[in-house]
Amino acid sequence: GLRLFWALLSVARLREWSVWCLSLSRLLGAGIPILQALQLLSRQIRSPTVWRAFDEVIADVTAGASLSNAFKSRGAVVPDLVQVMAAAGEQSGKLEEMLAELGRFLQRQEDFQRRVRGVLSYPLVLLGAGLAAAGVFHCLVLPRFEQLFASFSLPRPIASGLHAFF
């Protein structure tokens, strides 16, 4: 439940990773060495946490580590799927293709999550409006009816039992 909620809120993060994967794939496809491509892409990262992690990735790759190992040592900053796909791409010799496919997959996942959020927002708005209406009824309408019945010295109607629920 909580994991689904967090995933629905992470659409922006998915977008950032999809753009990053596609961009790295294109740079590698253009013949730019991986270290230089990483340096170019690190300038475009907005999140300070991810930016620091990418500085560490660049330092690891400069020291001779593979991209997948540099990603793995960053833990939760780099999504597991990115780590696994980078490792598969390195082992198969098709890093460029794997990153491009991963970028497209993440775009589709982002689109799906955006649609789900859109679909879920309508019932939440209705729920909020219903709760607001119930609160207004309880705080403003019921007390006036109480005053009205008291002013005419009328007994409270059967609905007075419902007052306990409001």
Image (cartoon, rainbow, N blue to C red):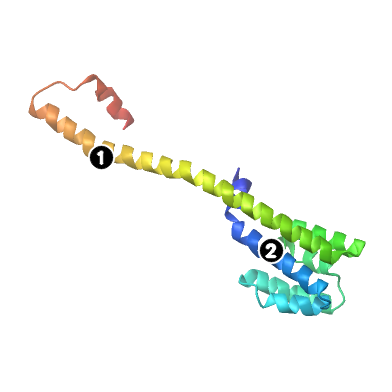
Picture disc at residue 51: none
Give the SS element for disc 1. Answer: helix
Compared to residue 21, the image places residue 56 above or below, namely below
Residue 92 falls left or right of residue 136: right
Pointer 2: what residue?
Answer: 17
Label disc, if present, on residue 139 of the rendered structure: 1
In this orientation, which residue lies closer to the viewer: 101 or 1? 101
Residue 143 percent coordinates (x, y): 20, 35
Identify the residue at the far front of this view. Answer: 30
Depth check, front residue: 48 or 37: 37
Q: CA distance from mark 2 to mark 1?
A: 48 Å
Residue name at image x 30 percent, y 28 percent: 164
Q: Amino acid at mark 1?
A: Cys
Q: Dot 2, how many residues are within 10 Å of its Cα: few (below 14), some (14-19), or many (20+)?
A: many
> Looking at the picture, how far across and down is residue 13, in whole percent?
63, 61
Figure quadrant of residue 94: bottom right
The residue lying at 68 percent from left, 66 percent from top is 19
> Residue 22 falls in which quadrant of the image?
bottom right
Q: Is residue 40 left or right of residue 87?
A: left
Q: Residue type at mark 2?
A: Trp
| Position of residue 12 measured from the top left corner of the image (x, y, whole percent) | 60, 61
